[in-house]
Image: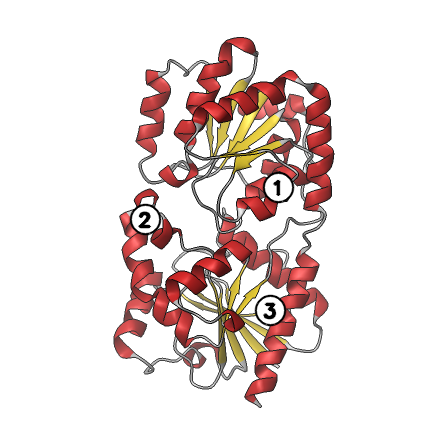
Amino acid sequence: MKYGIDISPLTPGRTGVGNYVFYLLKNMLALNASDQFVGFAVTRSRLALDGLGERLQVRHVKVPTRLLYAVWRASGHILPIETFTGSLDLFHATNYFLPPARNAKRVVTIHDLSFLVVPQYSSPRIVRPFSLGIRRFAHDSDMIIAYSESTKRDVISILGVPESKIAVIYMAVDDEFGQSTHDAAWLERTYNVSRPYVLHVGTLEPRKNVPAILKAFNAVKTEFPHRLVLVGAHGWMYEEIFRLCDELNLRDRVQFIGFVGHDTLATFYRHADLFVFPSFYEGFGLPVLEAMKCGCPVIAARNSSLVEVAGGAAPLVEAQEWEALAELVRTTLSDGLLREEMSRKGRDQAAKFSWKQSAAQTLELYRDLVGNKR
């Protein structure tokens, strides 16, 4: 068989979707020695393909992503995906947008529907373009992959897609993640981050609910020596977070680290006393699983996919209730034995998710669809 897969998210400094594509493809290539894989990318950015080996055939169209997408929207089937990849049995659209195809079966991954469920927490630059096509893409595809039961329910209820057309295939954390982290001294030398600290990882944007973290930390700051460390790129409306930090007089206790590479993330998780993630909505919530993989105790929000990812291994709190979050932070930081128990439960929960298993399920889905085609 010949499978095409959208590898546009595999750029330097990849984040959530990029990590999904990288680890899924890496494990599918390892499991499948007989079929051909063609990676298709439309982006002016450089691709970062180290670690995927030489079997992957690459077709890189170096134009702005939105330009080709606009052409596809306007032209219908004039430029099917096979124009760029050659003949395919199946094409996997890994980042929402489903290109036209001549004969290939088409699979689309819908990571989440945050832009429809909680549009007030999403940038208008995302809400409008993503909302325009997602219903059509969902119905035109031959199969949809969601990586949580929560997202599957959203796709059914909001997009009107039959349940039989949706496969839930979970994300995971790579087995090597966190095994070769730097020590605490390196963290202090490199980022000026010293223990003890409370950690949050995520883009600084409204959906991540960072103000609740700041308010909760402010409520307990006099009781503990910890700093609050925020790792993540500046996103939509990040200025509001800095403004609140100043209003609460927290500048001497909060550190904004910015974006760090995937490998370095494990060092932050490994040395934190607590990880907090009160997001308003997540399609999967990978940082929760990453923290658990590294043995860091986790507190998360009780909504969307976070309930199933946490799986009883982390206390949950309503995202809007920062006072309740503060009380959980206080309880957790006050009890070393509790943190040890949370760490153990988190590691056990993270062990239930495997990229090898996810890759095997995805390949099975491919083969079933191609079999139905023939």
Quadrant location of the C terminus in the rendered image: bottom right
**Can you see residue 14?**
no
Of 161 and 25, nearer the camera is 161
Q: Which residue is mark 1?
A: 290
Q: Do the residues bearing badges 1 and 2 touch, measured as CB atoms within 8 Å?
A: no
**Can you see residue 323?**
yes
Number of other residues with Cα within 10 Å of mark 2, as a class: few under 14, some 14 to 19, many 20 or more: some
What is the CA distance from the residue labelled 1 to the residue labelled 2?
26 Å
- Drawn side of residue 224 relative to residue 322, left or right: right
Indicate the amino acid at tag 3: Leu
Q: Position of residue 233 (x, y in %)?
A: 43, 38
Q: Quadrant of residue 89?
A: bottom right
Mark linked to residue 119: 2
- Eye-nearest disc, 1 or 3: 1
Indicate the amino acid at tag 1: Glu
Give the secondary structure at mark 1: helix
Of 203 and 259, nearer the camera is 203
Which callout, 3 or 2, points at the residue further toward the start of the chain?
3
177 versus 45 height, above or below:
above
Indicate the amino acid at tag 2: Pro
What is the CA distance from the residue labelled 3 to the residue labelled 2?
37 Å
131 versus 138 height, above or below:
above
Give the secondary structure at mark 2: helix
Q: Position of residue 72 (x, y in %)?
A: 32, 73
- Drawn side of residue 46 relative to residue 23, left or right: left
103 versus 107 height, above or below:
below
What is the CA distance from the residue labelled 1 to the residue labelled 3?
27 Å
- Eye-nearest disc, 1 or 2: 2
Give the secondary structure at mark 3: loop
Q: What is the residue that sits farthest to the bottom in this orientation?
A: 374
Q: Quadrant of residue 55?
A: bottom right
